[in-house]
Amino acid sequence: QLPLVESGGGLVQAGGSLRLSCAANGFTLDPYAIGWFRQAPGKERDWVSCISPTGIQTTYVDSVKGRFTVSKDNAKNTVYLQMNSLKTEDTAIYYCAAERAYSGSYCPTAIADYFNWGQGTQVTVSS
């Protein structure tokens, strides 16, 4: 697996914001689609968002549409997940994942579509 490192998690009050980062060490993210997933305690890991290699395609699960924004900074070799208007139900460990793509618009949403995973970062939203 390729090394991915998430950061930016923490404790925030409901209505607050956090920005998660997903950085690649030792390889370029240019040809990779990046997915964000989250896993709440006692629940399965769910897809949240993805961004295609070129950034032309971004998609979101309905529950975060209008609140979360995924972006890619090729110069910094980092993908971001900006999370605004956070809710208590957003509390989870957030993971980024990368999969080599051969289309600039490739943006998979299934866990099985991704081979490379980060270690996760905890996001806790208090009421």
Image: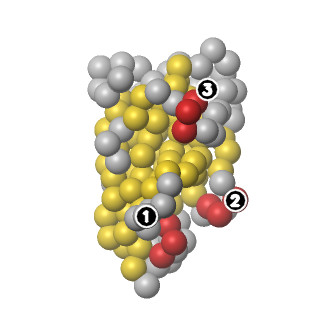
Report x, y in % for residue 9: 34, 58
Image mark for residue 54: 3
In the depicted view, which residue is nearer to us: 20 or 1?
A: 1
Left or right, 81 with respect to 9, comes to right
Mark 2: secondary structure: helix
Image mark for residue 102: none
Is the residue under label 3 in contact with that under label 2 (CB below 8 Å)? no
Look at 35% across and 33% down and name the residue there: 4
Residue at the disc numbered 1: 42
Left or right, 73 with respect to 70, comes to left
Look at 48% across and 76% down and name the residue there: 88
Q: Is residue 27 above or below residue 19?
A: above
Look at 36% across and 38% down and name the residue there: 118
Image mark for residue 62: 2
Report x, y in % for residue 107: 65, 33
Residue 32 in view here: yes
Name the mark nearer the viewer: 3 or 1.
1
Mark 3: secondary structure: loop
Extreme residue in the front direction: 42
Look at 35% across and 23% down and name the residue there: 2
- The amino acid on which the numbered mark 3 sits, given as a three-letter code, is Thr
Decide which of tag 1 and tag 2 comes sooner along the chain: 1
Decide which of tag 3 and tag 1 comes sooner along the chain: 1
Q: In this view, does 12 lie above or below 92?
A: below
